[in-house]
Image: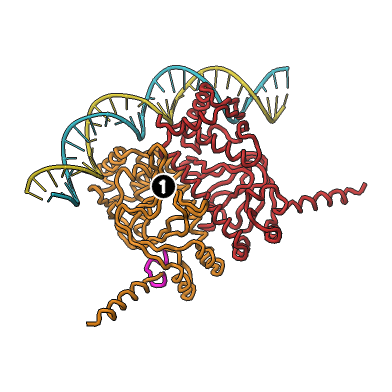
Chain colours: A orange, B red, C cyan, D yellow
Amino acid sequence: MPPNSATNTISLSVIKTACSNCNLRELCLPFGLSIEELERLDDLVSTRRRLKRGEHLYRSGVPFDAIYAIRSGFFKTDVLLEDGREQVTGFQMAGELLGLDGISSEHHTCNAIALEDSEICAIPFSRLESLSREIHTLQHHFHKVMSREIVRDHGVMMLLGTMRAEERLAAFLLNLSQRFTARGFSHAEFYLRMTREEIGSYLGLKLETVSRAFSRFQEEGFIAVQQKHIRILDVAGLKALMNHRA
Amino acid sequence: MPPNSATNTISLSVIKTACSNCNLRELCLPFGLSIEELERLDDLVSTRRRLKRGEHLYRSGVPFDAIYAIRSGFFKTDVLLEDGREQVTGFQMAGELLGLDGISSEHHTCNAIALEDSEICAIPFSRLESLSREIHTLQHHFHKVMSREIVRDHGVMMLLGTMRAEERLAAFLLNLSQRFTARGFSHAEFYLRMTREEIGSYLGLKLETVSRAFSRFQEEGFIAVQQKHIRILDVAGLKALMNHRA
DNA sequence: CTTTACGGTTGACTTGGATCAAGCTTACAC
DNA sequence: GTGTAAGCTTGATCCAAGTCAACCGTAAAG
């Protein structure tokens, strides 16, 4: 038996799973690039890494040298205060970028933790800067991605600063639903990868309040919840809840 | 009398006040550039604009085509919900950039309003992208500025998500103080350009709560307040207040 | 100088969400 | 299988901040 030939074929095909034939390319960094440009980006995205549930992709304080694209899986990012308080700053899914916070000080300023077994592509940042000096489209798209992160953060501030508990949770569910839809999953049915406590931390609420709001939404017929399994039954109802000053 | 000659001299000297001899250059976009590079940036920063207190620099929804550097003055940015709720997303001072949120959708997503008579430099964004494809240092610094904004937003999330009213106000005062210091002003004494209501909106509190927290800080001897005039008397006291889970 | 309006302070009372506590469900280890 | 721990739900109670209201201070307009 010549095992090498088979092995080589497999590993070659694995390596070949670069940006150019990644099915997330329209959601991720390669968006809008030509075939030739894509191949240049492939050269850059050399390191792939698998993470188990609970594993850190990076920790606050460690030197920054790459940003990460999520190939599959689900992450949270959080910031810890000295006294132990945790703020979850975001939940990230396939096609989204992690690590943009590290550019400013050349050190990561938050923790990124896999909430399920995941796979990421590491993109060395200085090489990304070089390439985006040559590829206008890549440069512009990268700027859009950073800007989108700022806009998203403003949305979270709005949520934390002016909304009541049920509005926050409704906004959260609608946002998740919309992002799952963009990835070809059901907009109405999904599993939450995070605990009630993590949702609470993100939304500035305690886990008991999150749990009660879920129960309330179920009583009202907006959703069906069973632990981490969510079915959205009334999108309009959830939206209405957010807009009227209750 | 020949008024023209005098006028021309003045306007020439005003025009010459470009990045290369702006005293904010170390805080602003030109940071780290060589003399020649600075001159290329000067060509780009052509439009200067004065705004009266209360005037909008841009409004949410209008097309984005430039970012703005604050030459002098003070701004707030806010997001309005359909039902009228306002979230102040930031306060910006000299040397800081406005409008980064507009890159992602090519439309501004918040309002920028002058809180005192101010002057800004408009930087056409597509020209900034061109130039930063040629000047590595400019590209890298711009990325750092965007990233810094993301880190700042995470700080605000932490504040809104996990801190109590007095911690939030203490964090806010310490942050202002630090930014004034970086601009060569007293770290201990300054005038607030915003109302209690705007502070409250930023911090996710009502104006009465902000007012009471100011009074409380004064009673404790941490600060002296008289309307918008603030003197910080005990930085350590304010810091301590933030760290101990009270 | 007086009027007026806006912003700020303070008090009394209410309330949404936190806290404390008990019990339940699910999943995994043994 | 059974045990156990982590996560979730629900109830009772409490409290920080919100709401409502009155009044004060300052600054701009007349």
> What is the crowding at mark 1: few (fewer than 14 residues within 10 Å), some, or many (at least 20)?
many
- Magenta-drawn segment: A19-27
Residue A211, position in %: x, y? 28, 41
Label 1 element class: strand
Front position in the image: B231 or D24 = B231
In the displayed structure, would residue A33 be above or below residue B61? below
Residue A138, position in %: x, y? 51, 66
Name the main secondary structure of what is drawn in magenta.
loop
Which corner quadrant of the image does residue D18 belong to? top left
Query: Is residue A207 visible from the viewing direction of this image?
Result: yes
Residue D22, position in %: x, y? 51, 18
Front position in the image: B109 or B123 = B123
Residue A23 colored in magenta in the image? yes
Residue ID for mark 1:
A89
Extreme bottom residue here?
A1
Query: Is residue A161 visible from the viewing direction of this image?
Result: no
Residue A7 colored in magenta in the image? no
- The N terminus of chain A - image quarter: bottom left
Q: What's under tag 1, amino acid-wise?
A: Thr
In the displayed structure, would residue B77 be above or below residue A137? above
